[in-house]
């Protein structure tokens, strides 16, 4: 009997460009990416909010976190100039972006707007 893949319920910490590319291009769900850095105060404030969204919306969106200090090439490739920045990817393509710290309800609204637009 095949086992079912369960929703993650938490954000995926991305540690390589290869993993990032596979994640955004192969996910059946839209991927909400939080571009952040460890020295960023607003990023630290957003972290628990991102975890809430990942847990509450695991069946609607896959949440990933990209540390721009660890993966500066990704930040450059996607022209991330402010952090935190949240982006939504579908089939490997960025379809929506929002810079700045947001509470969980605003993050949900941000990605739900994309779901409605589809």
Image: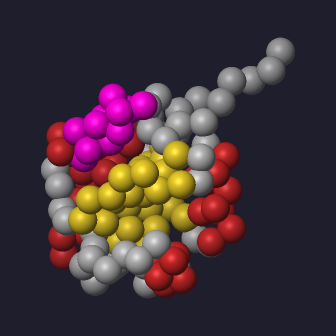
Is residue 115 within the magenta segment? yes
Q: Is residue 19 visible?
A: yes
On the image, the x and y values in percent for residue 73 come to: 54, 83
> Toward the viewer: 6 or 109?
109
- Where is 99 relative to 70, above or below? above
Direction right: furthest residue:
1
Residue that appears at 30% across and 35% down: 112
Question: Which residue: 62% across, 71% down?
Answer: 17
- Magenta part of the chain: 107-118
Q: Position of residue 78 (x, y in %)?
A: 46, 72
Which quadrant, please, contains the C terminus?
Answer: top left
Picture residue at 38% right of the left edge, 57% below the top:
87
Residue at the farthest top position = 1
Left or right: where does residue 75 sit relative to residue 98?
A: right
Quadrant in the picture for residue 85: bottom left
Q: x and y percent of residue 25 in the render?
A: 64, 51
**Colour logic:** secondary structure
Residue 70 in sight here: no
Picture quarter with the N terminus: top right
Q: Main secondary structure of the magenta part?
A: helix
Q: Is residue 33 magenta?
A: no
């Amino acid at each position: 009997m095949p086992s079912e893949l369960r929703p993650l319920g938490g954000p995926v910490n991305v540690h390589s460009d290869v993993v990032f590319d596979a994640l955004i291009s192969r996910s059946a769900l839209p991927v909400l990416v939080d571009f952040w850095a460890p020295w960023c105060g607003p990023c630290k404030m957003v972290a628990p909010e991102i975890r809430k969204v990942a847990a509450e919306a695991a069946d609607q969106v896959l949440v990933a976190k990209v540390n721009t200090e660890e993966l500066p090439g990704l930040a450059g490739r996607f022209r991330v100039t402010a952090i935190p920045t949240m982006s939504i990817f579908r089939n490997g393509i960025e379809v929506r972006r929002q810079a700045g710290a947001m509470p969980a309800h605003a993050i949900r609204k941000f990605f739900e707007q994309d779901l409605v637009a589809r």
